[in-house]
Image: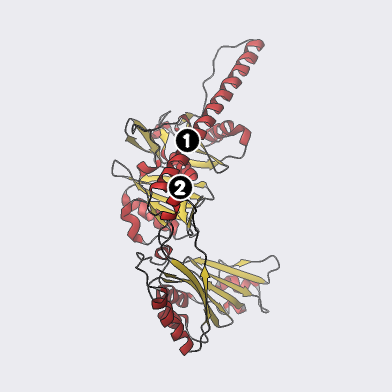
Amino acid sequence: MAIHIIQIDKHRFVCGLFWQSLSRPRELAAEARELGAKIDSDLYVLRIDQSIAQAGFGQSADGARRGMFSLGAIVSKTLALEGAFYDGEKQRVHNWLAALRLPDGMWAYFAARDANFLPNGDFAGTREEVLERLHGDYALGGWNVVLGDAELADYGFHNFETRTVESFIPRRKDGRIRAHRWWGLQPVRVRRSHWPAIAAGVLGAALAGGWVYMQHVKRLQAEQLAEEARIAERQKVLRLAAPSTQPPPWGAKPKPMSLATACVDRLGYLAAGGWLLDEYVCTGDSVSYAWSRHGSTLALLRAEVPDAKFDLNGEKASLVVPLRLERNQPEALLDREELMEPIISDMQHIGIGFKVASLPVPTPTSGAAQASAPRWQAYSFNCDSQGLAPTAVAQMLDKPGVRIDRIVSRAGHWSIEGVMYVK
């Protein structure tokens, strides 16, 4: 992976490290140096986020130098401390993608799954190269949030949050970067003296080195604790100052007709290899199939659906396929009566039971938090299509603030679940 170096203020930052997980909590530095030696890397950096330890490796032959700061380690630490807004609330984020414009015109790309950087999840390249990587990884599904420059907001990424690379770098009150030693690359091999020493001298050096190392670890821990406290305080101030921290959730979901059309178009494998399709579930992120053997064999299903997953007894099988749909800017909402009464009336006219229930909305207690409370109400709904295609029902639901969450087919019967948002 190519190393890319940029300068921000007086500091130099590096992208393109190769990340590997560590498994020896008491010997992280030693384990990292061992791994570095095995893969012929001479520089490394440690990151510890959300109980996850990883080492990022680089080579001086590619331009990296001792003391250069790992931009990926900084971004992941800030995100681990600040969290991100998704699924209706600000919370910790473990699966995320980030595409950030760099000061030199290049772009940085980061991808973390289960809080671990993917081995190629630290990358810098042109805008086209980064967008190609972003779209490719996004299609795999399962990401909590996508972070990036404002110009990417129109691409329809689920739970998109606008961020700049500078927003991840902590700064002092005077505007200078608040640098931390643990950001910097360290040498994999520690130089040793070539002169022999007597046993007592070796023991003394070992004891002294251990003491120095412990002091170094304590300093790193103190710096990270101080950084966590500083960012927590900053987030507290931002929460109190911001007029609203909760973006409209319907903007992160596809519209009813868009989802229903995609779900119907992708329905298949009704009797793949002689297996019976028990359930088909379609959401804005994926479609999934569940089959039972019905007297057939594993080989017959595998021949038609190579990616199917079987249970231990070979009686049940499943398949999940990512679904990527366009997300639109959140539209203005209607009043409850203006939205719901025509929908309910249409459902009653064709004999569809349409069940609606009020969803609770978080009610902050502090005055500042109350100012940022959501200015909408949400109602869940579910119905059975009564023999109609989901697209026919979705056509009646395709109104401002209405979103379908799940479309399910069982034995040929369709059911639809979703949420209606009103002002």
Please rate how many residues cluster around mark 1, counting C-alpha atoms within 10 Å: few if below 14, some from 14 to 19, many from 20: some
Residue 29 rendering spot, x and y as whole percentages: 56, 31
Mark 2 or 1, closer to the camera: 1
Residue at 40% across / 80% down in the picture? 395
Task: Give x and y (percent) for residue 363.
Answer: 49, 58
Alpha carbon separation for disc pair 2 and 1: 24 Å
Q: Residue at x 45, y 47 (%)?
A: 121
- Above or below 272: residue 11: above
Say left or right for 117 vs 107: right
Q: How many marks?
A: 2
Q: Which residue is mark 1?
A: 227
In the picture, measured across the screen, residue 83 lies left or right of residue 338, that is right
Instruction: Residue 253: give x, y in percent of width and height.
Output: 43, 66
The disc placed on residue 64 is: none
Indicate the quadrant containing the N terminus: top left, top right, bottom left or bottom right: top left
> Looking at the image, is 163 positioned above or below residue 153?
above
Q: Where is 216 relative to 35, above or below?
A: above
Of 394 and 336, the residue lying toward us: 336
- Density class for disc 2 (Cα within 10 Å; few <14, some 14-19, many ≥20) is many
Which residue is tagged 2?
121
Can residue 373 be seen here? yes
Amino acid bearing label 1: Glu
Q: Residue lying at the far front in this picture: please name it.
A: 367
Of mark 2 and mark 1, the one earlier in the sequence is 2
In the image, what residue occupies the spot 36% across and 33% down? 173
- Inspect the image, locate mark 2, and give the three-letter code of the amino acid beneath it: Gly
Q: Secondary structure at mark 1?
A: helix
Judging depth in this view, the residue of 18 and 341 nearest the camera is 341
Image-based side of 29 in relation to 185, left or right: right
Q: Position of residue 167 (x, y in %)?
A: 37, 43
Residue 17 visible from this viewpoint: no
Q: Quadrant of the C terminus?
A: bottom left
